[in-house]
Image: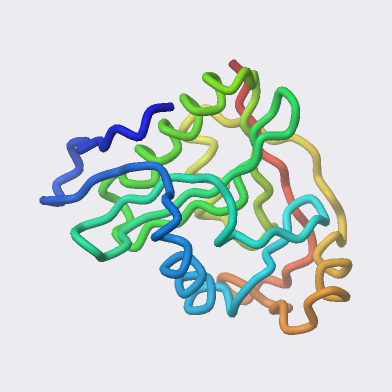
């Protein structure tokens, strides 16, 4: 994937999507503090320092609008985070497209993500973009809490957070 900046049609003016750069790391760590209570974040039982991962940002001047981070594991790419502060305008979709393209260019044939059982919006987001349900990891979030006790017990709509559902797209 080149470091070319993209300006997709989203209805938001003056923004660019580009690869995460070294100068973005502090902003990403601050975002994690504000929206996740800090790092590490967990996926598939493994901790990740999101501020150090590869990814893409959508920025409007110096303001972060959306972020996706991922890792490459063999022939798979795993999305660790995907967030948009301007929901419903297509930024998340554009970041997802950029991630899939980067994964293909890296020789991957699959992109996956772990979604906690309470995050129905994320499940909808991925499935409406061609992802299918994969592995269900029962009670894995309890394991995460052993490493990070401040991890919340209840999530969206007051749903108890216990499990991860892996979503995936193959290409």
**Residue at image x 78%, y 77%?**
148
Return the residue found at the far left: 13
**Quadrant of the drawing holding the C terminus:** top right
Q: Residue 88: percent from the left, percent from the top? A: 30, 51
Query: Relative to 78, does residue 160 appear above or below in the rendering?
Result: below
Q: Position of residue 154 (x, y in %)?
A: 68, 77
Question: In the image, 60: left or right of 79?
Answer: left
Q: Nearer the viewer, residue 26 or 44?
A: 26
Q: Nearer the viewer, residue 68 or 90?
A: 68
| Residue for point 76% across, 60% down | 47
* Left or right position of 32 against 115: left
Lateral position of residue 28 relative to residue 76, left or right: left
- Residue farthest toward the bottom in the current orientation of the protein: 150
Front residue of 65/117: it is 65
Q: Is 142 on the left-hand or right-hand side of 26?
A: right
Tell me where residue 156 appears, x and y as whole percent: 57, 70
Q: Is residue 9 above or below residue 163?
A: above
Q: The N terminus lies in which quarter of the figure?
A: top left
Say which residue appears at 48% left-offset and 34% top-offset: 99
Image quadrant where residue 4 sits = top left
- Furthest toward the front, the residue is 22
Residue depicted at x 73% and y 34% = 73
Task: Please state the horizontal and vertical placement of residue 115, each as a whole percent of the image.
Answer: 65, 52
């Amino acid at each position: 994937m080149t470091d070319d900046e993209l300006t997709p049609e989203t209805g938001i003016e003056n923004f660019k999507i580009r690869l995460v750069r070294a100068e973005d790391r502090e902003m990403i760590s601050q975002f994690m503090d504000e929206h996740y209570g800090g790092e590490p974040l967990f996926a598939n039982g493994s901790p990740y320092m999101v501020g150090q991962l590869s990814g893409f940002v959508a920025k409007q001047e110096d303001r972060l609008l959306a972020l996706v981070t991922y890792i490459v594991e063999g022939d798979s790419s795993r999305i660790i985070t995907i967030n948009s502060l301007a929901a419903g305008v297509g930024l998340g979709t554009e970041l997802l497209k950029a991630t899939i393209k980067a994964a293909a260019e890296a020789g991957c044939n699959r992109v996956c993500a772990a979604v906690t059982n309470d995050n129905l919006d994320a499940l909808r987001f991925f499935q409406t973009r061609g992802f299918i349900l994969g592995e269900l990891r029962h009670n894995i979030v309890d394991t995460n809490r052993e490493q990070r006790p401040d991890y919340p017990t209840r999530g969206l709509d007051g749903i108890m957070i216990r499990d991860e559902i892996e979503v995936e797209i193959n290409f």
